[in-house]
């Protein structure tokens, strides 16, 4: 090392830590690696095919990221500044010149290779995702599988997609021609870090665009691992660049850049509004915003018949508590037909108490800040004299403490109709259960929200499934199921839950521009 200049040394250290991190394919190995470090590791950016720290001048600052299950400092990340973001965007622009002209077979081949490499390293990604986000390892494995599908799905989609040509009045042959829209800012949240990051990266590069991605500062580990994997896949330099940092500095610089042609964002509604504002004058910029939800689950009395009761309870509970309730699609407002209300509440509470046990089947919430947000709502529930059928107000915690961020599954009843507990997205393991009188009342309550992302409908009445399902103001309605996904169907929300849809041809809409050609027959 003595011969190296500081820059080379930094690169060497990053390569060493990449090798060491890549070797941790069990929780035990990862924990022993973390405790062996004299100082927390610092995650690098991935720009132009290289892992490296941004310019470390006097303005450089770092962000600390904590392990949710223990509260301990896990790693640091550099807060990429405007000049670092600009440099990544320029690399993405350069790469666009050739990537946008690559054949679909060439692009498809890279996506396939990435999905294969993810498959080979499934456990490694699941281990680090579980440590970094707080989720249980079983849940992390499901999410890595979905990341694999994101790449494999779009690798075949682009091979099979067809564009129809048609004759207009026998005079002109008309067809739609699609071109990649350019360089995209891909901004993802902390609840399903790899799953949602790859849900953006895969279609973006499949359709011939290039990317500057920014994962959440709370969970950047899997994005770092993905950078290493993209190197191993030999994806051409600059096609995907990953910059680390927070929203106000790094995210804002990325979104606002005039050299960025589109933004695909998943996260909170307030951030979505900030992104809309920041880009309002850039009409040409494609915006796809997938935002928050306060999703209703409607339980009709017929679904509580002896033959379907168990399924009804299980689906309502899974929709509420999967991933600690940290999924924008979680059903956090349950409404039950009055005739079945008491029975549902008793069975549901018993099921949740047995099924969701902290540290065994339910993980920690993602950060101290998020813990405090959830705690604030539970304190409010206590102040409003709401009934805690399960759970209680958790004690305060601080970053860097030794407790971790554990919130027990919480079931609230007797909530006043105008309470913010029924309006705000809490995004944690907290659900309200309220009665409804009839179908019209159920629809009214379900739609009484600024959000319109998802809904669950539990009924055995086939006519009602459609009658009610088609009246619900939500982009996704699941009937007697939850989180069933077909990656070709439109995914996104109504009202304040977002703008645009992604998935299959809907992703093509986001990442390409259309021109219509008319070729007259003379
Ligand atoms: N999947 C979802 O629907 C999610 C919803 N949320 C909701 O939002 C609430 C707030 O959580 P946050 O961590 O603050 O979410 P957030 O919306 O601020 O974070 C999502 C991503 O946006 C980035 N970001 C933040 N401000 C930005 C800006 N001005 N320009 C560009 N990028 C920016 C963040 O760095 C992160 O990568 C949560 O409590 C939850 O209710 C949060 C995360 C995911
Ligand atoms: O695409 C899915 O299957 C799930 C997406 C979940 C989110 O977008 C979210 O929680 O933000």
Image (cartoon, rainbow, N blue to C red):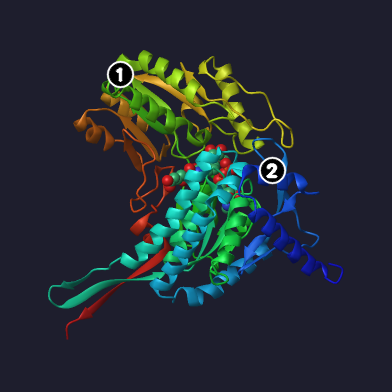
How far from the left and from the top, in percent, is residue 428? 53, 32
Q: Quadrant of residue 392?
A: top right
The residue identified by callout 2 is: 31
Residue depicted at 37% across the width and 46% down the height:
485
In the image, 342 versus 248, the foreground residue is 342
Crowding at label 2, few (<14), some or many (≥20) Cα neighbours within 10 Å? some
Any part of residue 129 in sight: yes
The residue identified by callout 1 is: 437
Any part of residue 80 in sight: no
The quarter of the rendering in which ligand 1 is drawn is top right
How far from the left and from the top, in percent, is residue 465? 24, 33
Quarter of the image with the C terminus in it = bottom left
Label 1 – label 2 distance at C-alpha: 52 Å
Q: Is residue 50 above or below residue 480?
A: below
Residue depicted at 61% across the width and 70% down the height:
48
Q: Quadrant of residue 92?
A: bottom right
Q: Is residue 214 above or below residue 423?
A: below
Quarter of the image with the N terminus in it = bottom right
Residue depicted at 18% across the width and 77% down the height:
172
């Amino acid at each position: 090392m003595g011969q190296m200049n500081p820059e080379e040394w930094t690169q060497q250290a990053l390569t060493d830590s990449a090798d060491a991190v890549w070797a941790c394919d069990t929780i035990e190995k990862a924990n022993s690696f973390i405790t062996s470090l004299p100082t927390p590791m610092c995650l690098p950016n991935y720009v132009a095919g290289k892992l490296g720290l941004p310019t470390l001048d006097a303005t450089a600052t770092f962000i600390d990221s904590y392990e949710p299950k223990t509260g301990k400092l896990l790693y640091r990340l550099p807060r990429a500044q405007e000049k670092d973001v600009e440099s990544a965007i320029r690399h993405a622009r350069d790469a666009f010149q050739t990537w946008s002209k690559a054949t679909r077979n060439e692009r498809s081949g890279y996506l396939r290779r990435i999905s294969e490499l993810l498959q080979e390293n499934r456990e490694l990604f699941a281990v680090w995702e579980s440590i970094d986000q707080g989720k249980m390892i079983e849940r992390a494995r499901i999410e890595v599988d979905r990341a694999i599908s994101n790449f494999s799905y779009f690798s075949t989609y682009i091979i099979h997609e067809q564009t129809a040509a048609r004759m207009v009045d026998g005079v002109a042959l008309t067809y739609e021609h699609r071109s990649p829209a350019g360089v995209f800012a891909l901004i993802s949240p902390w609840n399903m870090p790899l799953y949602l990051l790859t849900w953006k990266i895969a279609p973006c590069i499949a359709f011939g665009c290039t990317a500057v991605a920014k994962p959440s500062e709370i969970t950047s580990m899997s994005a770092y691992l993905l950078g290493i994997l993209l190197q191993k896949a030999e994806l051409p330099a600059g096609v995907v660049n990953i910059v680390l940092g927070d929203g106000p500095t790094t995210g804002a610089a990325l979104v606002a850049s005039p050299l960025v042609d589109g933004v695909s964002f998943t996260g909170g509604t307030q951030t979505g509004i900030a992104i809309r504002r920041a880009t309002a004058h850039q009409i040409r910029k494609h915006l796809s915003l997938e935002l928050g939800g306060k999703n209703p689950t409607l339980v009709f009395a017929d679904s509580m018949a002896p033959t379907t009761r168990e399924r009804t309870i299980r689906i309502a509970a899974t929709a509420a508590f999967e991933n600690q309730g940290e999924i924008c699609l979680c059903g956090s407002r349950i409404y039950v037909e009055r005739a079945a209300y008491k029975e549902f509440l008793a069975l549901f509470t018993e099921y949740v108490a047995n099924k969701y046990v902290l540290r065994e089947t339910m993980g920690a919430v993602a950060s101290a800040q998020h813990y405090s947000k959830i705690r604030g709502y539970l304190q409010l529930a206590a102040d409003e004299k709401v009934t805690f059928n399960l759970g209680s107000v958790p004690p305060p915690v601080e970053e860097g403490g030794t407790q971790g961020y554990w919130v027990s599954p919480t079931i609230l009843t007797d909530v006043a109709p105008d309470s913010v507990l029924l309006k705000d997205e809490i995004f944690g393991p907290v659900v309200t259960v309220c009665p409804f009188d009839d179908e019209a009342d159920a629809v009214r309550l379900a739609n009484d929200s600024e959000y319109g992302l998802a809904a669950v409908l539990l009924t055995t009445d086939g006519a009602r499934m459609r009658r009610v399902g088609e009246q619900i103001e939500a982009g996704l309605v699941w009937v007697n199921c939850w989180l069933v996904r077909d990656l070709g169907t439109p995914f996104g929300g109504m009202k304040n839950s977002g703008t645009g849809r992604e998935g299959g041809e809907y992703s093509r809409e986001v990442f390409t521009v259309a021109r219509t050609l008319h070729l007259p027959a003379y």
